[in-house]
Image: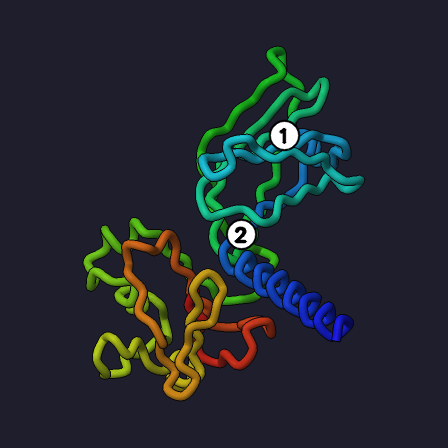
Amino acid sequence: MRRSASSSVLISIVIVLASGGLVLAGETGSVSGVVKDSQGGVLPGAVVKVSGPQLPGGREGVTSGTGSYAFPGLLPGVYKVEATMPGLGTTAREVRVLVDNDAQIDLVLRPTATEEVTVTAEAPSVDLKSTEVNFNYTADAIRQLPLPRSYKGLFQLVPGVADSGLPESSSLGPAAGGSRQDNTYLIDGVNITNPGFGYLSTEVNELDITEFNIKRGAITAEFGRAAGFVAN
């Protein structure tokens, strides 16, 4: 009996940890890139720091032998990515991190008299590593666009997503050639799809949404049966 109870506790812990990892995957994005010199050569050993309102203390790392760096598990928002190396000064760029996206930002260090070069313009966030057809919208889009004041209004901006003709509470219909039952709805990575009818099993208040992501094509295997779209 004692061994059985211990096994049950261990299984429960594993399940909780596994589910926590799934939630984290649906809440965060990442930043990666390469640090180079002015001639295009890679710079191993450069110190790279990422910081922002969501990460006040920042996070540091050192570039690899190929000059690359990566910061996974970042909450959505705008971050400052800064690289520095003795003799080559400092450079920095701003980047917006989106849910389930990797923003690639390459940094260039040049010798300067003051040893500091700062670029503050926000870089466009384009995930060059993923083949998924992704659409990301922030809470500002819900407030500012001339659409129904609901996250469902954003579906109208996504090519290939049709209106089901059903009441708004039943969500939307076919997408990317699939049926309504092929769609998947997630909250922070947790599936809330009604498996029988392909709509949300619970409603979401738009005021609780920080960012909204729709995957409409080339969806990876981690999302299982989704042949229409995945909304997270």
Within the image, what quadrant is residue 159 found in?
bottom left
- On the picture, is 13 further left or further right than 196? right
Q: Residue at x 61, y 58 (%)?
A: 129
> Which residue is outermost to the top?
113
Q: Residue at x 70, y 71 (%)?
A: 5
Q: Residue at x 29, y 67 (%)?
A: 152
Image x and y of residue 221, in percent: 60, 74
The C terminus lies in quadrant:
bottom left
Label 1 sits on residue: 83
Mark linked to residue 180: none
Image x and y of residue 177, in percent: 42, 84
- Vertical placement of residue 174 versus 229, above or below: below
Image x and y of residue 1, in percent: 75, 76
Within the image, what quadrant is residue 156 found in?
bottom left
Q: Is residue 11 visible?
A: yes
Mark 1 and mark 2 lie on one chain; the one further toward the N terminus is: 2
Q: Secondary structure at mark 1?
A: strand
Q: Amino acid at mark 2?
A: Gly
- Vertical placement of residue 224 versus 71, above or below: below
> Which residue is outermost to the right?
65
Nearer to us in this view, 54 or 86: 54
Label 2 sits on residue: 29
**Crowd band around label 2 with a 10 angstrom C-alpha radius: few (<14), some (14–19), many (20+):** many
Q: Is residue 178 visible?
A: no
Q: Secondary structure at mark 2?
A: strand
Q: Residue at x 55, y 56 (%)?
A: 24
